[in-house]
Image (cartoon, rainbow, N blue to C red):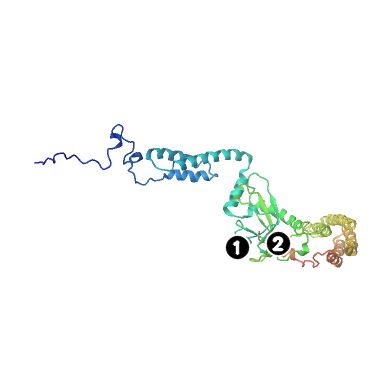
Amino acid sequence: MSIPPPPGHQRPRAPFGPPQANRPQGAPGHGPYGPAGRPYGTPVSVNALAVAALALGVLCFLPAAGLVPGLIALRQIRRSGQSGRGMAIAGSVLSLAGIALWAVVLPTGAESKAWEGFKDTARGNESLSLEKGDCFDAPGGLEGDTYDVDRVPCRGGHDGEVFAVITLPGGAFPGDARITDVADEKCYALQDRYAMDTWAMPADVDVYYLMPSRESWRYGDRAITCLFGNTEAGAGLTGSLRGDPTTLDTHQVLFLSTANALDAALYEEPGRTPEEDLAAHRAWAARVHEVLGEQIGALRGHPWPAGARTPVADLVADLEDARTEWKRASTAGDADTYYAHYDKAYGFVDGPATVTARKALGLAATPPAPGDDEKKESEAQV
């Protein structure tokens, strides 16, 4: 048998009042319950998609990535009462702005510059941003990681010194072999424009270069960076090797220009011997004769300082004698006659008169040791 409740006793009320759906008309919208039927005091979670939308919206190189998560987050927040509505809206707006920005940037080709700026910011001073005259250190030296380098003052020790930057044309990636061929041709030809005094170049220094990879090419990298480095593994450079019109006076520049023009002509000597191809050697001797005439005219027409006038005049006399021998070699009837004039002509090149003139002009006065060029070429690692 049930026992009736005491008179006046009522059924206990639910601890938080009636559900919102059964709320009496006129009752306050939120009693002990918060929005969406959540009791007050219960922690409100942040919508994860809203956070993701904001993060992706900030990353402008992924312009549309934050838009979809932002829209989904707004719908979820309306249903669940989670926080994060402001982040979802901000992420969506930033994504829309990113789409608009890239719509303007892509047709103009400016994406390459934008990528370069991003890479520089993300990875620091890289080889892609090196310029002529820069000195740098690379992790592990030139044999290590050369895509993450630090610029350093040239007056101290460093791994490399940039003497030229060659910009390749656009289009499809030409391949590693083709880029290497261009670097071989251009970098070696440009080294004397930066370091004009070849006698001042240390024997353990040679030409290296950094080239675009297939991956970096896709992001606009078109630069071949030509640089000087030490041929001894782990060894570096000390002080700048630069010797051009920015560091030399006009007398030194003119003297070295004539010397380097003659050297360039002499380096074109045919690979086959005079016995094998006398005609090619005679044609080459004629070109050397012509170049010597141009250089002699330049040396004679320049107003040299008082202390250099006599030494330069003596050098010009030697060059005249050499020119005569090259002329005779260019008309030699057989290999033996050719060799006789060839040897006499070379006897006037870089002789005592050249050393005296260099001293008078304040240039390096010790000729490079025979075979230095061949040694450096065989030791250089590209």
Secondary structure type for disc 2: strand
Q: Which of the image's four quarters has the C terminus?
A: bottom right
| Image location (x, y in percent) of residue 227 | 69, 58
Residue at 78% from the left image edge and 64% from the top image edge: 199
Question: Considering depth in this image, is 344 or 259 the residue closer to the camera?
Answer: 259
Residue 144: x, y in percent? 60, 61
- Crowding at dot 1, Cα within 10 Å, few <14 / some 14-19 / many 20+, comes out as few
Q: Residue furthest left?
A: 1
Q: Which sits earlier in the primary sequence, circle 1 or circle 2? A: 1
Residue holding disc 2: 206
Whether residue 269 is visible, yes or no, is no
Residue 7 falls in image quadrant: top left
Asked if residue 8 lies left or right of residue 167, the reply is left
* Residue named by callout 1: 140
Nearer to me, 200 or 374: 200
In front of the other: 170 or 176: 170
Across and down, in percent, residue 161 comes to 69, 59
Front in this rendered view, residue 15 or 257 = 15
- Displayed quadrant of residue 333: bottom right
Residue at (52, 45) in percent of width and height: 58
102 vs 267: above or below: above
The residues tagged by marks 1 and 2 sit, at their Cα atoms, a distance apart of 18 Å
Name the amino acid, label 2: Asp
Whether residue 188 appears in this view of the structure is yes
* Residue pictured at 73% horizontal, 63% vertical: 374
Count of picture labels: 2
Q: Residues within 10 Å of mark 2 (few under 14, many from 20)?
A: many
Q: Amino acid under label 1?
A: Gly
Relative horizontal placement of residue 334, taking residue 215 as reference (left or right): right
- Report helix, strand or loop for mark 1: loop
